[in-house]
Amino acid sequence: MSADFSSKITLVFNSAEARLQIVCGQKGQLLFSKELFSPRQGMQVLLPALMEGLEKMSLSLENIGKIACVRGPGSFTGLRLVLATALGLARAHDFPMAGIDYLPAVAMDVCAATDKEVWVITHARRGQVHYQAFQGVALDGLPIPLTQPAAGTIEFLAETINSRDAASVLLGTGVQKNREFFEDAISNATLLNERFSHPKPETLLDIAATLEYGDAPVDPLYLRPCDAEENLDYIVSMKGVDPEEARQRLARLTTTLPE
């Protein structure tokens, strides 16, 4: 199969969950994609996998015109490491960047196929999820949000969905992790299987084509503190550090000083 490389291609990274996706192409033309299960090791495997894929297509970094990164919500460590790697690549080669919101990306294909409320529910930690509701698609093909992205317990989410009293479709890794609970707790809902839990490479390219690119780094979308923050008292106590002193140190380290 011959491909037209006369124009620059788009590179897309997705590290919102344990499955790392690397996608290259243009809208309507997927050149290559690779998926790796690499929790907490995105930085080590990202560039080697990218270079291997480019080489197989007889391409190089010179053929890339821009980078789109999924910015969350998702794994704190996975997002941070891959966004940092992508930023280094962009700075070194003058690639403009843009961010992709993960929950609409998961919802996009399903929203195009149903008029029901579509709830994307992704795993955050045991008993907790990230979630957002959508219904229908806009003129650009992107799903229309009904709610803001949020994080919470599966019990609170079930109450929220039931209170809307509407037919719904549920999908995402949070559904797969808690399937029995959602089957029992939510009425008038269709639960989709694992193959709907991650965005297709073609979908990521379609979304990337709608974005505005620039020189600024992609800001991650975190909806809940990282596990280290939530367990700070326990972690520092094990190291003999006073929890209050640790919180003060953390506040100093994460506070932006005025210029």
Image (cartoon, rainbow, N blue to C red):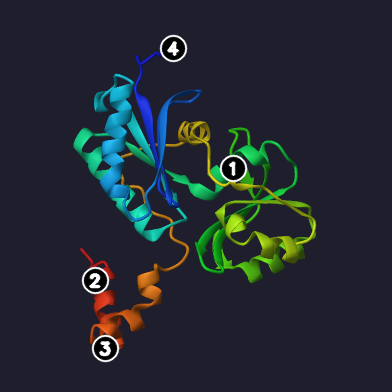
Q: Alpha-carbon distance for marks 3 and 1?
A: 46 Å
To which quarter of the image does residue 258 belong? Answer: bottom left
Q: Earlier in the sequence, mark 2 or mark 1?
A: 1
Q: Alpha-carbon distance for marks 2 and 3?
A: 17 Å
| Residue depth check, mark 2 versus mark 3: number of the one nearer the observer | 3
**Residue found at x 35% / y 72%:** 228
Q: Amino acid at mark 1?
A: Arg
Q: Amino acid at mark 2?
A: Leu
Res 253 label: 2
Q: Position of residue 154 (x, y in %)?
A: 62, 67
- Residue picked out by circle 4: 1
| Residue depth check, mark 4 versus mark 3: number of the one nearer the observer | 4
Q: Position of residue 229 (x, y in %)?
A: 36, 73
Where is 143 relative to 254, above or below? above
**Closer to the camera in the image, 218 or 186:** 186
Circle 3 crowding by C-alpha within 10 Å: few under 14, some 14–19, many from 20: few
Tag 1 secondary structure = helix
Q: Alpha-carbon distance for marks 1 and 4?
A: 27 Å
| Residue depth check, mark 3 versus mark 1: number of the one nearer the observer | 1
Count how many numbered circles sit on residues in the image: 4
Q: Earlier in the sequence, mark 2 or mark 4?
A: 4
Q: Amino acid at mark 4?
A: Met
Circle 1 crowding by C-alpha within 10 Å: few under 14, some 14–19, many from 20: few
Where is 143 relative to 133, above or below? above
Q: Alpha-carbon distance for marks 2 and 4?
A: 53 Å
Where is 120 relative to 89, above or below? below
Q: Amino acid at mark 3?
A: Asp
Res 242 label: 3
Tag 3 secondary structure = loop
Q: Alpha-carbon distance for marks 4 and 3?
A: 63 Å
| Residue depth check, mark 2 versus mark 4: number of the one nearer the observer | 4
Q: Earlier in the sequence, mark 3 or mark 1?
A: 1
